[in-house]
Image: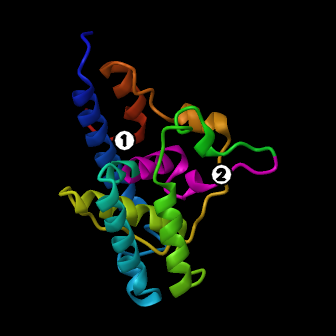
């Protein structure tokens, strides 16, 4: 196979990421949450997310892609549960420390800032999983990308996943098209590639 340019690879990865988010976003919390959950439970949550993301983008426009990637990597292992935000503890390595995430994922500080502010308004009401999903969505929208609906209110935080699981569940971005399609096909068994 011929080589492709970094710009083409970035565009391809971005499109696949958006597709994954659309798929995961439509099923995330389907049974125990709904789109306007925080309108009643914590009206300030969405405003805090939007304002914090906007401020971060003004300082560094690239943070929009970083937040989308952070959400993608969280969702890809075992669902959108914020497990990628957890630190290692008791000798168990964290998902964020896997070979595909360590020293390459950023945006944690934006999510931490949002969570700290939201906790002041609505203690223990807004899940980190929802903050991560809303931040990724708002970041994409604020730089001119699509805006999608997100089911929220799931309160299902992750317990973390073994480092090996995180590594094996991610696509090796350096592979050619055919191995990439073979990797993603099981994720959408009814889809045509």
Q: Give the x, y percent position of residue 68.
A: 37, 51
Q: Is residue 100 shown above or below 88?
A: above
Residue 192 placement: quadrant: top left
| Within-10-Å neighbours for mark 2: few <14, some 14–19, many 20+ | many
State which quarter of the image contains the C terminus: top left
Q: Is residue 102 left or right of residue 24?
A: right
Mark 2 in CB contact with mark 1 (< 8 angstroms): no
The mark that comes first in sequence, 2 or 1, is: 2
How many labels sit on residues?
2
Which numbered marker is on residue 141? none
Residue 1 placement: quadrant: top left
Residue that protrudes farthest toward the top in the picture:
1
Segment colored magenta: 67-90
- Which residue is located at x 48 percent, y 38 percent? 104
| Within-10-Å neighbours for mark 1: few <14, some 14–19, many 20+ | few
Residue 152 placement: quadrant: bottom left
Magenta segment includes 68: yes
- Which residue is located at x 80 percent, y 44 percent? 91
Q: Is residue 94 left or right of residue 155?
A: right
Magenta segment includes 72: yes
| Front label number (2 vs 1) | 2
Q: Is residue 156 shown above or below 38?
A: above
Q: Give the x, y percent position of residue 101.
A: 53, 39
- Which residue is located at x 29 percent, y 48 percent? 18
* Residue at the spot of label 2: 160
Which numbered marker is on residue 188? 1
Residue that protrudes farthest toward the front in the picture:
59
Q: Is residue 14 left or right of residue 88?
A: left
Describe the element under mark 1 as helix, strand or loop: helix
- Which residue is located at x 40 percent, y 27 percent? 173
Residue in front for this viewpoint, 50 or 185: 50
């Amino acid at each position: 196979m011929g080589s492709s340019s970094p710009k083409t690879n970035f565009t391809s990865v971005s499109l696949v990421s958006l597709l994954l988010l659309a798929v995961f976003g439509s099923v995330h919390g389907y049974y125990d949450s709904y789109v306007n959950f925080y309108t009643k439970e914590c009206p300030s949550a969405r405003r805090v997310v939007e304002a914090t993301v906007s401020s971060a983008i003004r300082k560094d426009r690239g943070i929009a892609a970083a937040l989308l990637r952070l959400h993608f990597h969280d969702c890809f292992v075992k669902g959108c549960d914020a497990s990628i935000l957890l630190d290692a503890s008791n000798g168990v390595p964290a998902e964020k420390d896997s070979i595909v995430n360590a020293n390459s994922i950023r945006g944690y500080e934006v999510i931490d800032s949002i969570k700290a502010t939201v906790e002041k308004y609505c203690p223990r009401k807004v899940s980190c999983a929802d903050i991560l999903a809303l931040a990724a969505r708002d970041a994409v929208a604020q730089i001119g990308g699509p805006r999608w609906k997100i089911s929220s209110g799931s309160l299902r935080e992750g317990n973390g996943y073994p480092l090996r699981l995180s590594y094996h569940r991610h696509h090796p971005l350096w592979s050619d098209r055919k191995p990439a399609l073979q990797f993603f096909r099981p994720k959408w068994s009814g889809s045509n590639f």
